[in-house]
Amino acid sequence: MKIDFWFEFGSTYSYPAAMRIENLAKQRGLEVSWHPFLLGPIFREQGWDDSPFNIYPVMGRYMWRDVQRVCEACKIPFRRPSRFPRNGLLAARVACQFSSAPWIPDFVRSVYLANFSEDRDISTPDTVSSCLSELVAEPDSVIGEAQSLAAKNRLRKQTERAVEEGIFGAPSFLVGRELFWGNDRLEAALSWAERHGA
Amino acid sequence: MKIDFWFEFGSTYSYPAAMRIENLAKQRGLEVSWHPFLLGPIFREQGWDDSPFNIYPVMGRYMWRDVQRVCEACKIPFRRPSRFPRNGLLAARVACQFSSAPWIPDFVRSVYLANFSEDRDISTPDTVSSCLSELVAEPDSVIGEAQSLAAKNRLRKQTERAVEEGIFGAPSFLVGRELFWGNDRLEAALSWAERHGA
C-alpha cells in the first residue's frame, strides 16, 4: 500500500509534511512515493504571478504565524525565510530525476531544512550540492544530470500530471485517485490508504 | 476562559465547526462566544465577487469532496446544497442581535443543518422562522428586531471588527488576539485557550 506525496520546495506547509510523512507512513506499513512538482505554472493558470500568501497579505500574515505554531506542535525547527517563496526548480529537478533513489527522502528533508530552518538560498547549485554531499558520492554529477533536457522534461511532465490529478496546491497526497490537500490532511490521507489500500 | 467563534452561514467549513464547537469546548471547561459575520464584504475587498470555491473551480471540486469526508469522519449529516453560497444575511442578523441569548447555539446549528444537510434556502424569513420555531415563543418578533436599523448596524460593525482582527475566512477562532482559521484548527484553538487562558 502506498501514498503519493506531492510537494513543492518553496511551499511552507509542504515543509512539516515532508518532515513527518516517512515516519508516519512506516508506522502504518505504508510506502511513500515522492512527487516533486512546481506550483508556479499552476498558480499562473489561476492568474497569480506570485504566492497567494504574498498576493493576499492578510492571509500571508496569518500563514506565517500558523506555520510557526504547526512546526512547534510537531517539534520541527522553523525560521521564517528572509525570502519567500524561494525558487525550488533545481532541487525539484534533482528529486524528480532521482525519485526512486534511496537517498531521496533525506535529500528532500535536507532541502526543506535549508529553506525553512536555516534560511539558505535553495535555488543555487551550491546549496543543492551541500544538501547532496552526505548522500551521494558525486553531487556535481547528480546536479549535472538534473539539468539535462530529459530531467527538465520529466519535471515538466510531472507538473502536468499534477494538474491532471486535480492538484492545485501543496502539499497534496494521493491515495489512488483520492486527493487530500494540506499538511493538516496528512493523517486523514494515511488513514484512507490503510482502509482502502492502494 | 473563552473562545470566540467567528462564522458565516454560507461557509461550508463553518458547518462542521458550528456542529462541534460547543461540546468540545464544554469538555475542556471553555465558554464559546458566538460571532456571526459576513464574508461577502471581505471577499469583495480581495477582488472576489463570489466564493473562491466558485472562482477557482478546481479548488471548489476538491472542497466538496473534502467537506463530505470531514463530515463523515465527524458523523455529521451532509448533503451538497443545490445552491452555493447561500445568503446568510438574515440568519446572521438574528444571531448577531441575539448573540448572548441561551438559544443561540441551537439556532446556529439549526440554520447550518438547513443549509448543508436539508438543502433549504436559508435566506428566506420562512426558513429562518422555522429554525427559530422551537427555540423562541415569537419567531416573527425576533426576525422583526433582526431587521431593525440597530441590528443591521450591529452586524456591519461585527464584520468590520472581523477585518480588524485579521480575519479573512470562516470559520475563524480567536483566543484573545491569537487567530486560528479553519475547521481543522478548532482543536488547536481550544488547546491554546486551555494553555494560555483567555
Image: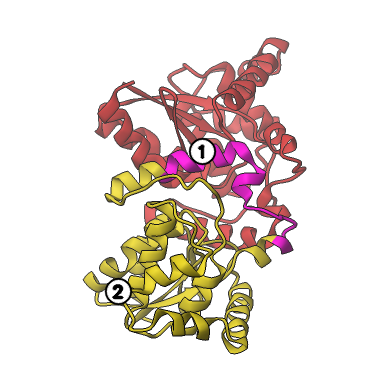
Chain colours: A red, B yellow
Q: Residue furthest top?
A: A150
Image height check: is B193 above or below B83? Answer: below
Q: Residue at x 41, y 22 (%)?
A: A176
Image height check: is A97 above or below A79? Answer: above
Instruction: Let me know if residue B65 is in the magenta part.
Output: yes
A158 and B141: which is toward the camera: B141
Q: Residues within 10 Å of mark 2 (few under 14, many from 20)?
A: few
Q: Residue A52: image x %, image y %?
A: 67, 49
Q: Is residue A101 left or right of residue B40?
A: left
Q: Residue furthest bottom?
A: B150
Q: Residue at x 62, y 45 (%)?
A: B54
Q: Nearer the viewer, mark 1 or mark 2?
A: 2
Query: Which stretch is magenta?
Result: B44-67
Q: In the figure, residue B59 lies in which quadrant?
A: top right
User: Which chain contains the residue that carries disc 1?
Assistant: B
Distance from disc 1 to disc 2, alpha carbons, whole Å, reads 36 Å
Q: In the figure, residue A72 lies in which quadrant?
A: bottom left
Q: Is residue B69 left or right of residue A60?
A: left
Query: Disc 2 on helix, strand or loop?
Result: loop
Residue A96 seen in the current view:
yes
Q: Which residue is mark 1?
A: B62
A172 and B93: which is toward the camera: B93
- Secondary structure character of the magenta stretch overall: helix
What is the tally of numbered marks visible in this picture?
2
State which tag comes first along the sequence, 1 or 2: 1
Q: Residue A115: image x %, image y %?
A: 59, 44
Image height check: is A71 above or below A48? Answer: below
Q: Give the amino acid type for the residue marked by disc 1 in the picture.
A: Tyr
Residue A9 seen in the current view:
no
User: Which chain contains the residue that carries disc 2?
Assistant: B
Q: Which residue is mark 2?
A: B134
**Which labelled disc corresponds to residue B117?**
none
